[in-house]
């Protein structure tokens, strides 16, 4: 459907408040290898080499990253100096994968206990096009050229951390930035590995103020909350060399079956296409099932969405119901429940079966009907039952009559408290737990 002028104005206003700059359509590619996605030339830095290092988290390459939002300061540019990263990770199939991201060394001093700490930021939903990556968003907080619309909304959390003297590394996830594959949207293992390996890459980067004693924490909301929750579960087995002081998982999509039903027909209905695309990238055995159930409209939508950022998806696919994409008019959620392979795949994506060995803070809005509150709260309950130190926060806000607002508003309302909780963990303060009261809370 055509973009609403009011929605477009709101998105551009948000980006402008972040200090964003518009990017024109790309001119000639800088090299024969450059990728152009919806008129945006992706720097050749994002093209992975033919072979990757053996070690997970090993740096493949790095370069200076100019921050669009930066001011001169007495102790260096504010909020700090950024470095673009490419590092090696392992995907859910056990194959090596190149992942990109960025590290920012803050100019502000860390005033907490111990050496300067590090927070790995797992971005919320950015889209599936290579131009949507969070690291590219640091350089271009607004991409707006008539073909794409991407807003670097994670800058707020990152800059608040940098102002506290906390170093930040942000991951682009597998396939979002690096141009060799499609982004495996909300894949539990891919997301977790990308987050944990970003920490390894940042710690190995020369010339930073990080030390072997620097405490590490994770921050993520929505897609990012799912990635950090999964990372906290997988850290003991996948990255025991990355001990965690704490993890914030805001509005985590822990149960993708429940989330699939919730986003169908919502303002973020385009995320269904990113999910299906990602599922087929992770497990090619699912492709024949998709081919059998999707009609021409659905297949065209998935192809279209595969290069979209969240901005244009909000306008182009807001309110679309997946039943219009299928051959028999069934919604995708019903097809998942009827297909054993799909059902098993989503069951394997469930977060909550593992056990973090470090403190976690789970926050969810009571009125969130996009990433449903109940399934996020269930994650906290499951972890409590396993003896995890869980701090659970239900953000009580009145329903705002719009699923996107119901989902995004708790992020803003709770962010200050979430960051304070993280910085307390980074200072070595004990976390505590409210698991004893959780089962009786709404």
Image: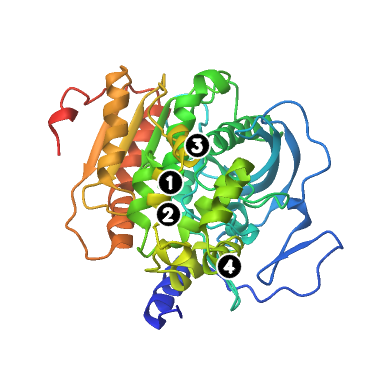
Res. 188 mark: 3
Judging by the rendered image, the residue that carries numbered circle 2 is: 332
**As drawn, is 361 to the left or to the right of 339?**
left
| Separation (CA) of disc 3 from disc 4 | 26 Å
The scheme the figure's colours follow is rainbow
Q: Mark 2 or mark 3: name the one nearer the start of the chain.
A: 3
Res. 166 mark: none
Residue 78 visible in image: no
Mark 3 or 1: the one toward you: 1
Query: Which residue, as the protein is rendered here, is positioned at the far right?
Result: 32
Q: Quadrant of the C terminus?
A: top left
How dense is the environment of label 2, judged by Cα within 10 Å: few (below 14), some, or many (20 and up)?
many
Q: Secondary structure at mark 1?
A: helix
| Separation (CA) of disc 2 from disc 3 | 20 Å
Q: Mark 3 or mark 1: name the one nearer the start of the chain.
A: 3
Judging by the rendered image, the residue that carries numbered circle 1 is: 336
Answer yes or no: do the residues labelled 2 and 3 have beta carbons within 8 Å?
A: no
How dense is the environment of label 4, judged by Cα within 10 Å: few (below 14), some, or many (20 and up)?
few
Answer yes or no: do the residues labelled 4 and 1 have beta carbons within 8 Å?
A: no
Q: Secondary structure at mark 4?
A: helix
Judging by the rendered image, the residue that carries numbered circle 4 is: 300
Q: Mark 4 or mark 2: name the one nearer the start of the chain.
A: 4
Residue 267 place in picture, x, y as percent: 37, 65
Q: Nearer the viewer, residue 63 or 411?
A: 411
Q: Quadrant of the N terminus?
A: bottom left
Q: Mark 3 or mark 4: name the one nearer the start of the chain.
A: 3
Mark 3 or 4: the one toward you: 4
Query: Which residue, as the protein is rendered here, is positioned at the far left?
Result: 440
């Amino acid at each position: 459907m055509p973009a609403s002028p009011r929605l477009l104005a709101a998105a551009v206003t948000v980006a402008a408040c972040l200090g964003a700059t518009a990017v024109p359509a790309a001119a000639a590619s800088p090299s024969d290898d450059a990728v152009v996605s919806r008129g945006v030339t992706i720097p050749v830095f994002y093209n992975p080499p033919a072979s990757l290092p053996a070690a997970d988290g090993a740096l493949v390459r790095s370069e200076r990253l100019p921050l669009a939002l930066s001011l001169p300061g007495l102790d260096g540019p504010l909020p700090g100096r950024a470095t673009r990263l490419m590092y090696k990770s392992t995907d859910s199939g056990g194959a090596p994968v190149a992942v990109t991201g960025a590290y920012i060394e803050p100019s502000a001093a860390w005033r907490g206990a111990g050496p300067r700490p590090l927070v790995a930021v797992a971005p919320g939903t950015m889209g599936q096009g290579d131009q949507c990556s969070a690291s590219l968003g640091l350089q271009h907080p607004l991409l707006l050229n008539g073909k794409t619309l991407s807003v670097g909304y994670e800058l707020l959390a990152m800059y608040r951390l940098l102002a506290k003297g906390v170093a930040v590394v942000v991951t682009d996830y597998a396939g979002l930035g690096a141009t060799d594959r499609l982004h495996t949207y909300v894949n539990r293992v891919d997301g977790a590995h990308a987050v944990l390996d970003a920490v390894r890459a940042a710690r190995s980067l020369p010339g930073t103020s990080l030390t072997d004693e620097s405490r590490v924490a994770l921050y993520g909301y929505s897609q990012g909350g799912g990635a950090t929750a999964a990372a906290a579960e997988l850290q003991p087995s996948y990255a025991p060399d990355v001990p965690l002081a704490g993890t914030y998982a805001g509005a985590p999509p822990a149960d993708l079956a429940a989330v699939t039903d919730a986003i169908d027909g919502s303002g973020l209905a385009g995320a269904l296409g990113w999910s299906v695309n990602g599922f087929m990238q992770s497990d090619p055995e699912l492709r024949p099932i998709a081919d059998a159930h999707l009609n021409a409209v659905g297949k065209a939508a998935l192809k279209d969405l595969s290069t979209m950022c969240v901005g244009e998806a909000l306008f182009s696919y807001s309110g679309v119901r997946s039943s219009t994409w299928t051959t028999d008019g069934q919604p995708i959620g019903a097809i998942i429940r009827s297909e054993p392979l799909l059902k098993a795949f989503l069951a394997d994506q469930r977060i909550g079966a593992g056990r973090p060995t470090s403190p976690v803070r789970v926050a969810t809005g009571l009125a969130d009907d996009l990433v449903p509150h109940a399934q996020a709260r269930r994650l906290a309950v499951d972890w409590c039952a396993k003896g995890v130190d869980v701090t659970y926060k239900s953000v009580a806000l009145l329903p705002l009559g719009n699923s996107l607002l119901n989902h995004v508003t708790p992020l803003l309302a709770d962010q200050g408290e979430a960051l304070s909780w993280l910085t307390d963990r980074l200072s070595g303060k004990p976390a505590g737990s409210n698991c004893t009261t959780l089962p009786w809370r709404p």
